[in-house]
Amino acid sequence: MYEPAIVVRKPLEEDLEALANLIKRFYLFNEEFDPAWAVADNLDQAVLERAKAYINGEGLTLVAVLDKGPVGYLHAEVKENPLLATRKLGVITELYVTPSMRKRGIATRLVEEAQNAMAEMGITHIAAEFPSKNFVAESFYRKLKFRSYSSIYLREV
């Protein structure tokens, strides 16, 4: 089910523009599900800065690369709570694959590679965050045997 020519790796400097574009598309896609996810006015500059941070090692970032460059990416962070037995939780905060490359196992492969990297860091549980109305993400993660773990409720002030 995997796209055989896809390589999953950490992003490189040469991936900057493509990664920034993928991040932008991720946020624009999620904006469609909830107006609280409305993107910032300076989105182009903000995604460029975020892509630079990811390339420089902020969190765990992986890109799925086909011949011409990245076609998908995943970003995860480690959250620590010394009061819980699991202590460290790997949290996927961003996952995006370009529409033309979907249904080829790329997102699944990104999640599996992230899971392997987190396991090497001693992390025993991973979670995924996404807008609660994003039924596409919910269906995807349920298919991968993720379950509901925590709820966050939002209210405007």
Image (tube, rainbow, N blue to C red):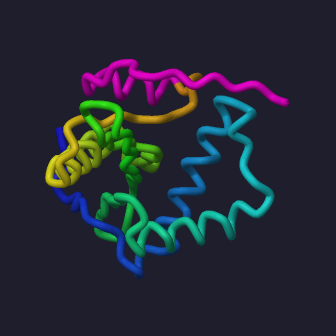
Farthest residue toward the bottom? 13
Q: Residue 66: horizontal and vertical position, in percent?
A: 30, 63
Query: Closest to the observer: 91 or 136?
Result: 91
Query: Closest to the observer: 60 or 11?
Result: 60
Viewed as shown, does residue 84 lie left or right of 23?
left
Viewed as shown, does residue 116 lie left or right of 110?
left
Q: Residue at x 27, y 39 (%)?
A: 108
Quadrant for residue 124, please give it: top left
Main secondary structure along the magenta-highlighted residues: loop
Viewed as shown, does residue 2 lie left or right of 87?
left
Q: Residue at x 59, y 23 (%)?
A: 133
Q: Residue 137: horizontal and vertical position, in percent?
A: 45, 30
Query: Closest to the observer: 110 or 122?
Result: 122
Farthest residue toward the front? 83
Quadrant including the C terminus = top right
Quadrant for residue 62, please give it: bottom left
Q: Which residues are magenta?
A: 135-157
- Label count reads 0
